[in-house]
Amino acid sequence: MINSDFLHPSDQLVMIMKRIYEYGMTTMSGGNLSIKDDNGDIWITPAGIDKGGLAGDDIVRVKPDGTTEGRYKPSSELPFHRLAYEKAPRLRAVLHAHPPALVAFSMARKIPDAGILASARHVCGKIGMARYDLPGSVRLGEKIAAAFEQGCDVVMLENHGVAVGAESIYKAFLLFETLDFCARIEINARRVGKPVIQKDKGFKCRAPGGRQTVMREFVPVSHSNEEKAARRDICDLVKRAYRQRLFTGSQGTVSRRLGAGSCVITPAAVDRAYIAPEDVALIDNGMREAGKTPDDLAPLHALIYETQPHVNAIITACPPNLMAFAVTGVKFDSRTIPESYILLRNMPRLQFDALFSRREEAAKTFVKENPVALVENGCVIATGGSLINAFDRLEVGEYSAKAIVASRDVGVIAAINDMQTAEIHEAFHLD
Ligand SMILES: [Zn+2]
């Protein structure tokens, strides 16, 4: 986990700009970020500099009297950043970018609905809209600042992009990334069917500010080498899943079985990009390691291990193509290519309450012919004999889903037929 209290504002901005650019959520010249520090200074990204290779000394310091310090001119969008801090003093960071999925909504003048994904609702907060105006103008700044003043966390900018305000640049980024994921899911879902948005108030989440796992604590006597290796492997896999766009900073859970009744699992509310072995939580016979907050899906993971002896690793995630099927009710048929069928098999669908109130039923699902399941508006659950096996299933699932979504524009899918499926069963010794 990263402690931003000890990082200079310039370094925080460079870190987050790099993440935005590498994630494909801004172009070289688009987007700008700022932080307001305790002295009232605004640290902001420079105008017209390559966002792919930004360095700490490229960041511009704007003092409360309006004078600037630095090698370059501040971003041309400084007026809206300054007005946002003025009108909404709770804000300490503002992020602005033009990611394609959110720009699609901004051009259609619609607000993406975070209710499409259970875990996104609390992360995304209140979303508003600012009418179109000239970039860099005080008029545009006033419209954006007015939305922040009314308590919005996110402001969609008509025919432009999005602005996010938060108490830190890390929080602003998580919110931005999560909302962008929701927008991608909704766009894919609309290509395969009609997305269902959950309006139910009982539709809680496992993200920061959401549902917390109630588990008794225990103090481990020692940490075995097997456990240490599992912590390391989980962190490596989480970062890989993040790079592969299968996880976001706020979503994605990985666990691995240890001995009887024991497993290690990713924590709740730790940014997936910065996860470290000490953040991972040990679970033993329904209890959590003292001082750790395991992911809210820990009881479900533990129950799957108890019910299914062949499962040694579980990954839960919300990748944008597979989730198109989980939010529309459109059946995901894995008989697309042999690789998909072999790894994914039946792909059953579970109702959302399978994650919390109907866990026993959900755990029974993961027999050998159902290694992966979709949970309505929830997530994808991929199980495996090893971490890499579960990861392979998640990745193959997401790629297959992407191919199915793309095929809608090409023609009607011809599924592998029963005879061909029987042949695959025999050749690959499937159960
Ligand atoms: Zn812009």
Image (tube, rainbow, N blue to C red):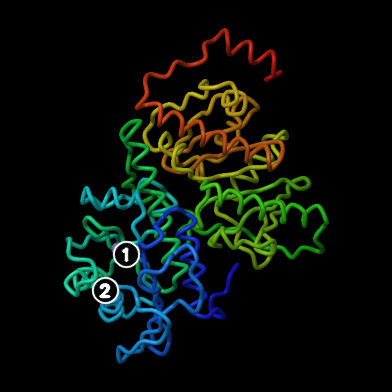
Residue 97, numbered label: none
Rendered-image quadrant of the C terminus: top right
Q: Earlier in the sequence, mark 2 or mark 1?
A: 2
What element does badge 1 sit on?
A: strand
Q: CA distance from mark 2 to mark 1?
A: 10 Å
Q: Which mark is residue 163?
A: 1
x and y percentages locating residue 31 in the rendered image: 36, 64
Res. 344 image quadrant? top right
Q: Work out whether 46 lies above or below 235.
A: below
Give the residue displayed 51% in from the left and 22% down from the top: 336
Q: Position of residue 250 (x, y in %)?
A: 49, 57
Q: Residue at horizontal 21%, vertical 57%?
A: 158
- Give the labeled residue for mark 2: 80
User: How many labels, in total?
Assistant: 2
**Residue at point 17%, 64% (across, down):** 133
- Is there any visible trace of residue 122 in the rendered image? no
The three-letter code of the residue at mark 1 reads Ala
Q: Is residue 408 above or below residue 52?
A: above
Amino acid at pointer 2: Phe
Q: Quadrant of residue 62?
A: bottom left
Q: Position of residue 180 (x, y in %)?
A: 38, 52
Can you say which quadrant of the picture contains the N terminus? Answer: bottom right
Q: Is mark 2 within 8 Å of ligand 1?
A: no
Callout 2 touching callout 1 (CB < 8 Å): yes
Point out residue 19 in the picture as x, y percentages from the top left corner.
49, 61
Q: Residue 294 occupies which quadrant of the picture?
A: bottom right
Could you tell me if residue 165 is visible in this image?
Answer: yes
